[in-house]
Image (cartoon, rainbow, N blue to C red):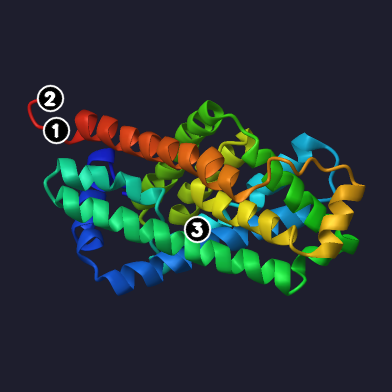
Amino acid sequence: MTCLTPKEFLERYAAAGTAKTQKSAGKLLALAALAGALIALGAAASSTAVHSLDNAGLARTVSGLLFPFGLCMVLVTGAELFTGNSLLLLSLLEKKCSLPGLLRNWVLVYLGNFLGAFLVAAGCVFFGQLSCSGGELAVYVIRLAAGKCALPFLSGFGLGIFCNVLVCLGVLLSLSAQDGAGRLMGAFLPVCCFVLCGFEHCVANMYYVSAGLLALQNPQYLQLAQAAGADLGSLTLGNFLLGNLLPVTLGNILGGGGLAALLWYAHLKENG
């Protein structure tokens, strides 16, 4: 067979959850920081590619083709990504891990993802990567971050649900394949869809908004953004943490966890 059945790849993920929840804190943080950095690098690449495009549909299409390589690199390297790890609910329902182990994984991986994404954001800002096109990239990143911070709470929550349904489908489709090309394509397509639709991913936002906030500390970038008429009122640390990251994270958990529960009930639950 060229691919596994749903029952087979769900069982494979559930079994892998045992090791995920039993890794040492040091390894979890290291692998999570790697995942956060890889997602951030995919986000940085897509932003660089589209920052000068005026057509919104074309910009989203180009981003959708580039951003998914972040998740592909996460899967190939065995890094730990918070959004994908919402699928650990499968392991819990299959009694392959404990609730404290699951929550420990989520907390450590979330912190590690934030660290990795922030380091990439800081590097892009302070090493001059945002100076592309005479600073137009910096203006784009600032505007993007401000827009994310201005999202209503319910919008961030709902867009976060849709996003992580697709991200977790990407993880599972990758597991269903029996070869490297199939694994990468399985991960690529659902993530491409979430970027095209403009859904919200908490780890990607750890990069996007961190980069926007840090760019404001550069007088040149700030001046360019003001000259371009960017609305900077919403771009604050409080709006980032409570107005964007909180609802998007909750939505991501519900989207991924809900998908895990549905698939477990449909394919793994005995006497269902």
Amino acid tagged 2 = Gly
Nearest the viewer among 181 and 187 is: 187
User: Disc 1 designates what residue?
Assistant: 269
Nearest the viewer among 81 and 205 is: 205
User: Disc 3 designates what residue?
Assistant: 72
| Image point (66%, 71%), residue name | 123
Secondary structure, mark 1, is: loop
Q: Position of residue 20 (x, y in %)?
A: 25, 60
User: Disc 2 designates what residue?
Assistant: 272
Instruction: Say if residue 74 shows up in the picture.
Output: no
Alpha-carbon neighbours of circle 1 within 10 Å: few (<14), some, or many (≥20)?
few
Dots 1, 2 in contact, CB < 8 A: yes
Q: Earlier in the sequence, mark 3 or mark 1?
A: 3
Q: Position of residue 138 (x, y in %)?
A: 79, 57
Alpha-carbon neighbours of circle 2 within 10 Å: few (<14), some, or many (≥20)?
few
Q: Is residue 79 above or below residue 173?
A: below
Res 46 quadrant in image: bottom right
Amino acid tagged 1 = Lys
Instruction: Say if residue 64 shows up in the picture.
Output: yes
| Image point (32%, 38%), residue name | 257
* Cα distance in 3D space between marks 3 and 1: 30 Å
| Image point (41%, 60%), residue name | 111
Secondary structure, mark 2, is: loop
